[in-house]
Amino acid sequence: MTASLISWAETQFWQAEQVNGRGTTQAAAIRQLEKTTGVRTGRIKTERLPLCVTHIWDWFIALMPGYGLSVPNPGQWRDDIKALFGIDPRAWELQALSLLFGAWIQNQK
């Protein structure tokens, strides 16, 4: 499931990338191209995130503004998740969160 989460997230990050200085995203540019040409490119992905990992995406969205491009240690994530959500994350969830932050940082380069 972690691989599905990372694949889904990388697609979301790519589609949200800006392609110009006016805030146009990859997804918006492709949709406009498809609308103009009448040809579906198949580059816009609309698959759903598996339900069993949506909570990790929720944690990422909640934690990302505070961390930005820095990646704290898993102990700090554990403390922050406990404080924000009242949950003690399991090791695999922290590993998935680490991979998610890694994918986010790679996308920002």
Image (spheres, rainbow, N blue to C red):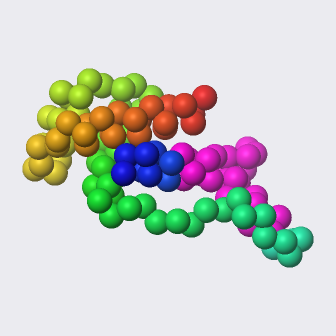
- The x, y position of residue 83, in whole percent, is 13, 43
Q: Residue at x 61, y 62 (%)?
A: 45
Magenta portion: prevailing SS class = helix
- The x, y position of residue 75, in whole percent, is 18, 27
Left or right of 32 in this view: 91: left
Numbered range of the magenta stretch: 10-34
Residue nearest the viewer, comparing 29 with 93: 93
- The x, y position of residue 98, in whole percent, is 35, 33
Left or right of 82 in this view: 53: right
Q: Is 28 drawn above or below residue 87 in the view shown? A: below
Q: Residue at x 54, y 53 (%)?
A: 12
**Total of numbered circles in the picture?**
0
Left or right of 38 in this view: 31: left
- The x, y position of residue 63, in whole percent, is 31, 41
Q: Is residue 74 among what the camera can see? A: yes
Residue lying furthest right: 37
* Residue 29 magenta: yes
Q: Residue at x 14, y 35 (%)?
A: 79
